[in-house]
Image: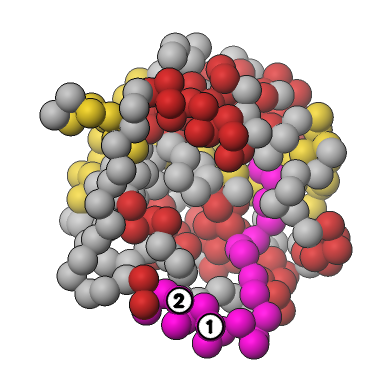
Amino acid sequence: MACPATATDLVLDLPWGRVAARRWGQAGARPLLACHGWLDNAASFDRLAPLLAAHGGLDILAIDLPGHGHSSWLPGAYSQPGQAACVLAVLDALGWQQTTLIGHSMGAGIACLLAASVPERVTALVCLDALGQLSAPVDATVPRLRKHLLSCPPGLSSTPRPLDSPQAGIVLRQQRNQLDAADAACLVQRGVVQRDGQWYWRYDPRLTEPSAVYLHEAQVQAVLGAITCPTLLLEADPPSRFIDAQAQQQRRACIAQLQHRRLAGGHHLHLGNAEAAAAAIAGFLGDTA
C-alpha cells in the first residue's frame, strides 16, 4: 500500500486534543496549509505536495482534520465552522499569521469559510473540485433536523465496523470515490488502524451521521462574495458527480479574484492528476507571490 511521498510527520497539541500533520518544503518559507475532504486524511496531498515543494519557497503542511486520520476526535458535534475554528487554532500554534490555504471538497468549504471570515489570515486560496459548503433549500430544514436528532442520541456514539483487511478498504474507496487502486491506497494507508487483530477506519464514526443544518444557497454565496484574496478553482473534467453545474457557475461569479481551470481527472484530481494540478497551483502561487 505504499504511496510515494517524502514528508516529515508532526503532531500539534491543542487544548482539545492533537492534530497530526505531514510537512514538506522549507521551514520558514511561504506557508501553505492543506485541508482534505470528508473521511479523507493528510495523505490526500501525498502526491501533490512533493511536486509543489520541488518548486521551492514553500513550507507546506497538510493536516488530518479533527476526527480524521491520526488527529483526535472532537468531544462534541462536527461542523464546518467548528473545523474552521480548529484550523485557525493550528495556524496560531504554528505562529503563522498568514497562509495560503488549499482545500479539497469539504476542505475547500472550510478554507472558504476562513478566507471570508478572517481575510487577514489568508493571502491566497486554492479550491480543489469544490467551492463553498453544501447547501439545502429552506423546506429541507425540519426534515434534516429530525433526521439528525433521531440518529444521534446524546451520550452514544456509533460503533466502528471492522474491515476484513486494508485491501478491503482500498476496494471500498475505489467503489465510493471512483479512485484507482494506487490513489485509494494513499488514503487507506493512513486511514486504517489494527486493533485486537481487526482493521478499522481511523475516522470518528460520528462524521457519517446526518448534519443538523445546511446553509441555504444564498448564505453560501454570501460567504463566497466576502472572499477578497486571489483564488484558484481547479475542477475535474468531466465534472464529477458532486458538482451541480448551475450552482457552481453562480458560485464562481461571487468571487472577484477567481481563476478557474478544468483538469482531466475525477473528484480527487490532485491525486490522480497531481502533475497538472501542481503546475497550475505553482503558476497561481507565482502570480500571487
Categorize mark 2 by other alpha carbons within 10 Å: few (<14), some (14-19), many (20+). Answer: some
Amino acid at pointer 2: Lys
Counting from the top left corner in percent of width and height, residue 144 is at 52, 78
Q: Is residue 100 magenta?
A: no
Is 254 above or below relative to 274? below
Is 207 above or below relative to 1? below
Residue at horizontal 19 percent and vertical 56 percent from the top: 15
Counting from the top left corner in percent of width and height, residue 85 is at 39, 62
Colour scheme in use? secondary structure
Say whether marks 2 and 1 touch (CB < 8 Å). Answer: yes
Amino acid at pointer 1: Pro
Q: Which residues are magenta?
A: 128-149
Instruction: Report the residue marked by disc 1.
Output: 143
The disc at residue 147 is 2
Q: Is residue 148 magenta?
A: yes
Is 77 above or below relative to 32? below
